[in-house]
Image (tube, helix red, strand yellow):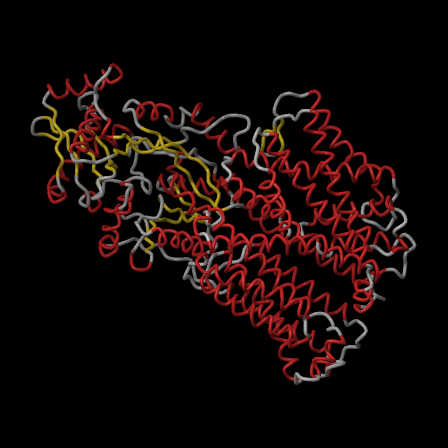
Amino acid sequence: MEHETRTELPSTDQTQARRALHIALLRRAGGPLLSAVLLCLALWALHAMASEVTYRQIAGYVHTLPNTDIGLAVLLTGAGYAVMTLYDWFGLASIGRRLPPRRVGLISFISYAFSNALGMSLLISGSIRYRFYVQAGLSTGEIGRVVLYTTMSFWLGLAALTGCTLLLVPIPPDVPLSGLRIPLAIVLVLVPLAWFAVSLTVRRPLRVWRWNVSAPTPIVAARQILVGALDWGLAAGVLYVLMPEAIAGGFGHFLAIFVVAQMAGLISHVPGGLGVFEAVMLAGFGATGNQGLEAPILGSLAAYRLVYYLLPLCVATVMVIWREVRALRHAAMVSPWFSSLLPPFFAGLTLVCGAVLLFSGATLAIPGRMEILRGFVPLPLVEVSHFLSSVVGMLLLILARGLQRRLDAAYVLTLVLLILGAIFSLLKGIDYEEATLLSLLALALAPAHRYFHRRASLFRASFSPGWMLAIGAVLACSTWLVFFSFKHVEYSNNLWWEFSFHHGGAPRALRALVGATAVVMLVALANLIRPARPRRAMPGEAEFARAMPLIKQFDSAQAHLALVGDKMLMFAPGDSAFIMYDIEGRSWVAMGDPVGKDEEARRELVWTFRENCERAGGWPLFYQVRPQDLDLYLDVGMNLLKIGEEARVRLDQFNLDGKSKKTLRGTVNKLSRDGLRMEIVPIEGVPALLPRLKAISDAWMRDKKVREKRFSLGLFDERYLCRTPMAVVWQGEEPVAFANVFVTETKEEASVDLMRHLPEGPSGIMDFLFIELMVWAKAEGYRWFNLGMAPLSGLQNRRTAPLWSRFGAMVFGRGERFYNFRGLHRYKDKFDPEWEPRYIAVPGGIALPLALANVASLISGGLGGVVRR
């Protein structure tokens, strides 16, 4: 309503907003770019330090590892993942929640198996925990506290173990940070000691980055430090038993190098610390008099990756697949959290399978298997299979993004490519291990078609910096593997055209690498050729005619805002739903939820809207979305911020009885005696009234010293006002107030938009109009009357609340000089409404201040309107 929602967001300085944009862009692009640089440096260092090592020597060491060592490494891995469950168990205990140990163990194991193998631990493990714990009945705040507890335990344990080890054990001078060993050790040891000291002395919440954290008890702090240290100690033990005997004598020196390497890998943000961890380990042991052991060390590191990362990932995959099979047999077991977890789960596995194919194509095939293959497979077929297996691997990396976006085409192509990849793996070198992995994933993916329901084009899927980094990292590692595996082969131009069973490994790897690189370059080129920024094409009568049936059948009367004509309309196929939106700066702001009854069409429209924004380099925002539709935005990975509450009056309980309604009752009775009456003018009668109503509107605007707003409310426009009925208050034969009325055919909700009155009109005229409208709507059989939103109401200012909530609560309580937030809430509250939260959905990592400034600019008709009435 015009006089109530003129400014729904605090004003933001344009210079500060632009600065926030630059910082956000730098943070978004700088992190992946730095990780890519560190990965390249690590691969270069590995190549330099292992210059005398051949791929066959490394593979030979792995094959000669004793079964007892491998079995002990597996046992230690199991113990390590069992200890990881204590993170969640004690985290739940810290917030006073208890879950069955079996469920906690399942949640912890699956989250850590995926995050350890794929990297991006906070994102992956946090999202998996969110899906599981929501199903278990935990609130978002409780889940956030558990994730914070586990993250702090993880780092406290690493800091304690690393600091103590560096204090007690010297490290070689060639290891990174060796010159700062003592200062670094002291700092790291002080971190857990300070945390423990806090638990003994402080009882107030502590500020940790963006969160306020309750000070732990001494027992809780000790648990965090000890569990984290034990976790890292067991991880070190897995690698220690796989190391060659020549350097296995001193666990202290080994542990010092291990923890430094792990910390370097974590700081680099390279997925799984791939390359960085190996480079530091090789540098550390190569500098301790272990020259000549580079091949065994690299072999033990490869075995460690298989045992500690890949094996748990395979077990977690089997567990989720088993859960999927059970769900197929018992449909009732399929729950929303599981349905939303499966697409990113299959995307992650597809990414792993693509990497396996690329790494396999970059290395030498096992000679014995090639000899067997020579007896019944023609050489041309082997060459083609080797080349195509790498192409399939790169395509799987790219299609993984489509699976995450739930694209039907990505599902079909991935299924086909997994089968082809398994066949090519057998034909190029009898790699039955790869073929088995690909076949198992294809079998698991086959019955999951219903989770990939989107019919959008594959070419519309955009790639985030994280995805580009993951694909680039795999390609970079594959390139390094090619040159490392065949460093003994002298390069010549004829090498590209050499075909042989026994001496064709290097040519095949080079050709396969070129094929994979060509695929990724073509996809990158297709993504660079983006459509131009769309022109503002406001809807005409044809678009309004398409939208009107959806508006009338929608359960929210606010869908009538599409008729204002100041927002573009995006329709779903078959006109089964639409989104109204406008563009300000980089922000594509949708007003409200998608309008329509078809839930699948609404869900697909949210995906389409986001993809269109990303292709144009914009930010998708959904403003004033309702609680019942939050899953639409969580499904596409958007974040939700509460921006206020909407007041809705339940009409079957509305009356003017009781002491609390005495003032309203008196106002209505007095104005009725003075001759005021309300009339609902149908649409066909509105045009004739508009000249008289225009005079009221102009007088109201002059008196209030305001100008027309837009976007989230209407304006005095004859074409718009002629599309809705009009409530007019008459005093005798003269109109003194009016409001255009939003009504739906479903009788679910009625509301108003533009409300204006003569400044010299009777006191209480707006109360009179509201009450008469509610009485009329109740008589007509409507269930609810919507009074509109009270911005920033209902936000919490507690220490544990998010930063945005605390800021909004502060503005709500102290921002009266800018906008009457409290007064608006009090005014609506006297009608005894039910308050329902409203949110804004935003993608993660955007410059939030600028996005909010763009929304305010849209509502106010420009940045100048944000600071002027």
Q: Position of residue 97 (x, y in %)?
A: 56, 31
Taking depth in this image into account, of 25 and 278 the one nearest to the observer is 278
Q: Position of residue 480 (x, y in %)?
A: 72, 65
| Residue 616 lies in quadrant | bottom left
Query: How many labels were placed on the picture?
Result: 0
Residue farthest toward the top in the current orientation of the protein:
659
Q: Position of residue 328 (x, y in %)?
A: 47, 55
Residue farthest toward the right in the current orientation of the protein:
289
Q: Is residue 736 left or right of residue 833?
A: left
Residue positioned 23% across, 46% down in the render: 552
Residue positioned 22% across, 24% down in the render: 767
| Residue 44 lies in quadrant | bottom right
Residue farthest toward the left in the current orientation of the protein:
733
Taking depth in this image into account, of 143 and 679 the one nearest to the observer is 143
The C terminus appears in which quarter of the rendering? top left
Q: Is residue 121 left or right of residue 486?
A: left
Taking depth in this image into account, of 297 and 679 the one nearest to the observer is 297
- Does residue 452 appear in this view? yes
- Does residue 506 appear in this view? no
The N terminus appears in which quarter of the rendering? top left
Taking depth in this image into account, of 434 and 715 the one nearest to the observer is 434
Q: Is residue 860 above or below residue 435?
A: above
Q: Position of residue 586 (x, y in %)?
A: 45, 49
